[in-house]
Amino acid sequence: MDHLAEIEDMLAQAKLRVTLSRLLVLDILNQAPGELAAWEIEQQLLNKQKKMNISAIYSILKTLEYKGLVQRFKVAGHHAYFSLNKSIGLVKCRCNVCAQMQHMDEALLQQCIVQYCEAAGLKLKSYSTLIDVICQKCSQK
């Protein structure tokens, strides 16, 4: 199955109508190596000669987030970043000096969070964590 067919299937499973706008936004997020801000999605659309209003992008992202297809990650005082929802959790490390964001492989952390919630009788829906660090590049300055 090609990636556009997979995206169409994702929309169908979420009981969302397949529209060109949703396909374009999900395709960009699918191809992105990390999270993207809405303005970055708009820029990538323009690079592909596709024009979409930023408010339409936000509306699509809000709908996709509500349906669980997209994760939103917001850092206080910064833009919200979006990615495909590939897991129940999101852990990011942000450099306090250069603000570079890095995705952390959170398999062990997720296991601990799931176990804690089960032990406490809580139903885990999702989680996001931001860890402030100083990256290797900045620590060498």
Image: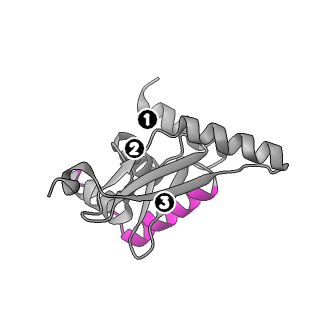
**Residue at the extreme top of the image, as rendered:** 1
Predominant SS of the magenta segment = helix
Q: Where is residue 87 in the image (x, y as percent from the top left)?
A: 57, 41
Residue tagged 3: 73
Residue drawn at x 65%, y 41% as measured from the top left = 112
Which portion, as a residue range, is magenta? 48-66
Q: Where is residue 115 in the image (x, y as percent from the top left)?
A: 73, 40
Does residue 111 show up? yes
Residue tagged 2: 27
Q: How far apart are marks 3 and 1 (CA)?
A: 24 Å
**Residue at the extreme bottom of the image, as rendered:** 77
**Looking at this view, is 27 or 21 the one in front?**
27
Residue drawn at x 45%, y 73% as measured from the top left = 76
Residue 85's quadrant in the figure?
Answer: top right
Quadrant occupied by the C terminus = bottom left
Residue tagged 1: 4
Residue drawn at x 53%, y 56% as measured from the top left = 129
Q: Is mark 2 on a helix, strand or loop?
A: helix
Q: Distance between the residues labelled 2 and 3?
A: 19 Å
Classify residue 34 as left or right of residue 64.
left
